[in-house]
Image (spheres, rainbow, N blue to C red):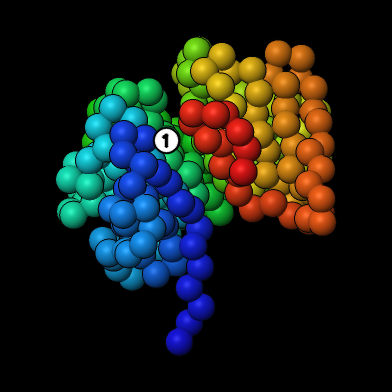
Amino acid sequence: GKAKRTRTVRLDPSNPDVVYAGTTAGLYRSVNGGDSWKCLLPDVVINAVVVDPAEGERLVVGTDDAGVLRSDDGGESFLPSNQGFSQRQVSSVAVRGSDSEELMAAVTLDREYGGFFVSRDSGKSWEAFNAGLETAVAGIKKIVVASASDEIFLGTGSGVFRGIPGKRDWQRIAETESLIINDMEISDTRDEKLFLAARQGLFSLDLKNNKLNSLKIPIYDREFSAVLVDENSKQVF
């Protein structure tokens, strides 16, 4: 049989016993902290999962070839939320705060038709916003939403970009230009630091001073594919 890989794992912020795993064979859910799993969405490649922090039953997933899918019942059923790009590869999805009407998605490997998209009506309609991304438009891997401002951060194959969709064009953070980003997470509600999982290793980025620091982990000095920040302790795993 074909190889199966887990591409993303997300906890329900309101219930730590509920875990979602996005894999190349479908979306799985555990309600007992990972002891057992149920397949909710078989035979769909899942690249990204977002669980609404205000309502754990609401989740959004980004897929290969099925666009963005949304569930309001904890993954028991899904509806498409991707008018205009339903057959494209969605590498990352995000929801702004507790307002699940505003969705964001990154469409990759689609030349001038890809990039960053935002929907302000739960996915009924989408608008592209790619000004300033240039060649990075085809390789967005992660969308991170700031907590204390309107800023959005994009992790790409050529560094980290910051901007405000519709208000301020994307600008690359120069210190990150050489990094190939696989994943990233913001560390606190003050938006002071990003942790970056890159092909070149694990880094922290001071967003106030644009200072990049390499984080050395003993006996593990190779590519990082993901980064997980504990919401309570703010520690990196």
Q: How many tags in the picture?
A: 1
Q: Residue at x 44, y 67 (%)?
A: 24
Q: Out of 236 and 135, give the one closest to the viewer.
A: 236
Residue under label 1:
94
Q: Out of 26 and 69, give the one closest to the viewer.
A: 26
Question: Which three-letter amino acid code belongs to the residue tagged 1?
Answer: Ala
34 displayed left or right of 31: right
Q: Is residue 217 visible?
A: yes
Q: Residue at x 38, y 23 (%)?
A: 97
Q: Residue at x 36, y 35 (%)?
A: 13
Q: Position of residue 2 (x, y in %)?
A: 48, 82
Q: Quadrant of the C terminus?
A: top right
88 displayed left or right of 146: left
Q: Quadrant of residue 161?
A: top right
Q: Quadrant of the N terminus?
A: bottom left
Q: Is residue 125 visible?
A: no
**Image height check: is 183 above or below 131?**
below
76 displayed left or right of 229: left
**Image height check: is 228 above or below 87?**
above
Q: Position of residue 136 (x, y in %)?
A: 65, 40
Q: Residue at x 46, y 51 (%)?
A: 9
Q: SS class of the residue under badge 1? A: strand
Q: Quadrant of residue 183?
A: top right
Q: Out of 11 and 72, give the one closest to the viewer.
A: 11
Q: Residues within 10 Å of mark 1 (few under 14, many from 20)?
A: many
Q: Quadrant of residue 236?
A: top right
Q: Out of 14 and 4, give the one closest to the viewer.
A: 14
Q: Position of residue 57 (x, y in %)?
A: 22, 40
Q: Position of residue 192 (x, y in %)?
A: 64, 17
**Image height check: is 141 above or below 233?**
below
